Amino acid sequence: MDFDAALAQTDLVLTGEGRLDDQTLLGKAPAAVAARARSAGLPVIAVVGSRSETLSDAALEGHGFTEVHELVEIAPTAAHDVRVSRQGLRDIGRRIAARLCPSPPSQ
């Protein structure tokens, strides 16, 4: 895949997982992505279904995650309804985009 070459051409990395937990930090794909991106000096945003309450922000930052957005926070019934999941993921994407690319002030 030449992941490192792809990293050299980006400003931000998005990754995701159903549940971000202690096992994630033991080498699952999102943690490997975050570690490689951190080594390249890139911010990493994780979009996940949910996050274990045992994972502190400091622990996640130490593994290269800059931000974590949980689907269950904005769409609690997402696990039971794919339409709710789809809309919740769109909403998270819009929030991230709005923060990273704010609209110019209106004249």
Image (cartoon, grey):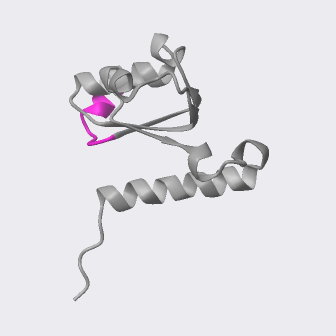
Q: Position of residue 18 (x, y in %)?
A: 61, 32
Q: Position of residue 3 (x, y in %)?
A: 36, 26
In-front residue for pair 22/38: 22
Q: Position of residue 71 (x, y in %)?
A: 58, 45
Region in magenta: 1-12
Compared across the picture, whether 57 is left or right of 25 comes to left
Check the image and report above or below for 43 versus 3: below
Check the image and report above or below for 80 versus 97: above
Give the quadrant of the C terminus. bottom left
At 30% from the left and 27% from the top, the residue drawn is 37
Residue with the most extreme bottom position: 107
At 51% from the left and 21% from the top, the residue drawn is 54
Give the quadrant of the N terminus. top left
Q: Report the label total.
A: 0
Compared across the picture, whether 39 is left or right of 95 comes to left
Is 69 colored magenta in this rendering? no
